[in-house]
Amino acid sequence: MSILVVGSVAFDAIKTRYGKVDKVLGGSATYFSLAASYFAPVRVVAVVGEDFTAEHEAVLKSHGVSTDGIQHVAGQSFFWSGEYGENLNEAKTNFTHLNVFENFRPNIPESYRDSDFVFLGNIDPELQANVRQQMSGARLVGGDTMNFWIQGKRSALEQTLRLMDVLLINDTEARMLAGESNLPRAAKRVLAMGPKALVVKHGEYGATVFFEEAKSGCTWRPFRAPALPIDDVVDPTGAGDSFAGGFMGYVASQAELNRDVFKRAMFYGGVMGSFAVERFGPERLAQLTRPEIDARFQLFRELTHLD
Amino acid sequence: MSILVVGSVAFDAIKTRYGKVDKVLGGSATYFSLAASYFAPVRVVAVVGEDFTAEHEAVLKSHGVSTDGIQHVAGQSFFWSGEYGENLNEAKTNFTHLNVFENFRPNIPESYRDSDFVFLGNIDPELQANVRQQMSGARLVGGDTMNFWIQGKRSALEQTLRLMDVLLINDTEARMLAGESNLPRAAKRVLAMGPKALVVKHGEYGATVFFEEAKSGCTWRPFRAPALPIDDVVDPTGAGDSFAGGFMGYVASQAELNRDVFKRAMFYGGVMGSFAVERFGPERLAQLTRPEIDARFQLFRELTHLD
């Protein structure tokens, strides 16, 4: 079943110990779409400027991603420039030019309205809520956020969290959102804000999903998926969005939504994240095959399973 | 088969958000012994002062731990005072009184010499090497170290690492020892220093074991065990030594040493670490039953296994 994603389609300049790129396709919706496209049809809602060419669009289209919801406007696309030092979990931002993204008003094409799954990429929580309301028939809504919104738009974010089924954030964000350093306690507080499930991404240590007990109708214990130990993390940009893409994509490919499906989704999230970091930008994600994905899924299993 | 452990038997004053204790039994050999005692017979080599009474000794003896190797000398036992803030992975040390530990010279009783397994707790690497040489017939030697020795006794530590089969340290120590921030690369460098296996403990995120490829004779892929998400981490003191005790204890209980055994040992390490932090000092570790341990092992499995 189809997934609608709203987020940024952008260009990035990235520097890591492995080199640098001056302008590669990036943005949360790009990474998410490519990762999810191996599992389910994806529809993108975003805005781009004149520097986003047919060639860039073809990267998405060649993966069956519908780009009808990408608004083309005058000006330049969102541009982010950043670099990573020893700590690959945190980028140092050189500059962020919002450009056309500054006036982004998500507009859901009529043909997208029947999407059963929705992913609200890391954008202003007011826009996330707006999209959510336009997609009132969705079966499952996932979303992301960041420190910028947690600190700067707390109240709007709390409204939006009530409209999300699954929130996917990292450790720092979960602790900041909850105001609590202990992770299981922080998870309980975040789940009390609305989501039925909270996926906390631990970077190189994997990710844990916590379930809201009352809402799931029964006690679903947390589940922890690993991350692959990788010698050459060429570029961590987009790993979190790729995780979300693998997670939501797998969920959307399944008939039923139960704990087993979410467990496997956690593995596929980790798998797609692990591919994303192997090359600069979305290069590796754009070149995958399903057998490669399944082989890595088996690696994840071997890394964690006793038998 | 028996495990010989050399390390500290000490007293601790500990403060956490859950309260404080002024003087509880502590030390690496204490935590290690109690954790390992549920799996195999343990023999302790350590030094204590006059404040270590028969009552303290009974805590170990009641778990079948042999205390013949504990030297009683005039003076006070090793005493550590520390506290934990929000970051439970790092204690703030108020003071460390080495006391009788300052002149500790490990002396292996004749009756201990047939121990098949040896654990070199976190003490001066020269003393570790000395014990290792006295136990030349050991089947498997595990060991621990810390930043203090990595920075201050690098050369002696490198000598000692050549005599260890399994090194168990945390992320920070592994990165410091290797001079490399990427964990799989750091692991390769550490394994090149001598150990056949390196267990890196990630605190609340679990632990990963890396194997030396050439020495294991075949390619054993890394294995990652989880840690239990715990709401009430009352006192993290001794979690690492308890991990080592569960790990070494399980290994010592098995006839063969293969990757499957090490995988399960990683789980039992995590299990014993998870119990250790539930109460102040070694209180919880001292009161366990094997069914409780097995039930938690199953929880660890449920937390990580797809089916």
Image: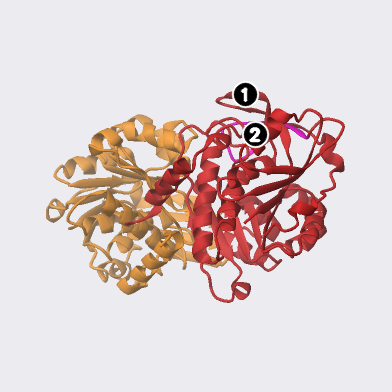
Chain colours: A red, B orange
Q: Which numbered dot is residue B125?
A: none
Amino acid type at image mark 1 = Lys
Q: Residue A79 lies in magenta, yes or no? A: yes
Asked if residue B205 lies left or right of residue A58, the reply is left
Chain containing the residue with disc 2? A
Within 10 Å of disc 2 (Cα), the crowding (few <14, some 14-19, many 20+) is some
Chain containing the residue with disc 1? A
Q: Which of A54/B240 is in front? A: A54
Asked if residue B188 lies left or right of residue A62, the reply is left
Query: Who's the residue at 33% across and 67% down the image?
Result: B56
Q: Name the residue under label 1.
A: A20
Q: Which of A61/A213 is in front? A: A61
Query: Who's the residue at 59% across and 37% down the image?
Result: A236
Amino acid type at image mark 2 = Val
Residue A268 position within the rendered picture, expressed as x and y whole percent measured from the top left: 51, 50
Within 10 Å of disc 1 (Cα), the crowding (few <14, some 14-19, many 20+) is some
- CA distance separating discs 1 and 2: 21 Å
Total numbered labels: 2
Q: Residue B257 lies in magenta, yes or no? A: no
Q: Give the range drawn in magenta.
A: A78-90
Is B155 above or below relative to B129?
Answer: above
Residue B265 position within the rendered picture, expressed as x and y whole percent measured from the top left: 31, 55
Image quarter in which the C terminus of chain B is found? bottom left
Q: Closer to the N terminus: mark 1 or mark 2?
A: 1
Q: Which mark's residue is nearer the viewer, 1 or 2?
A: 2
Q: Mark 2 points at which residue?
A: A59
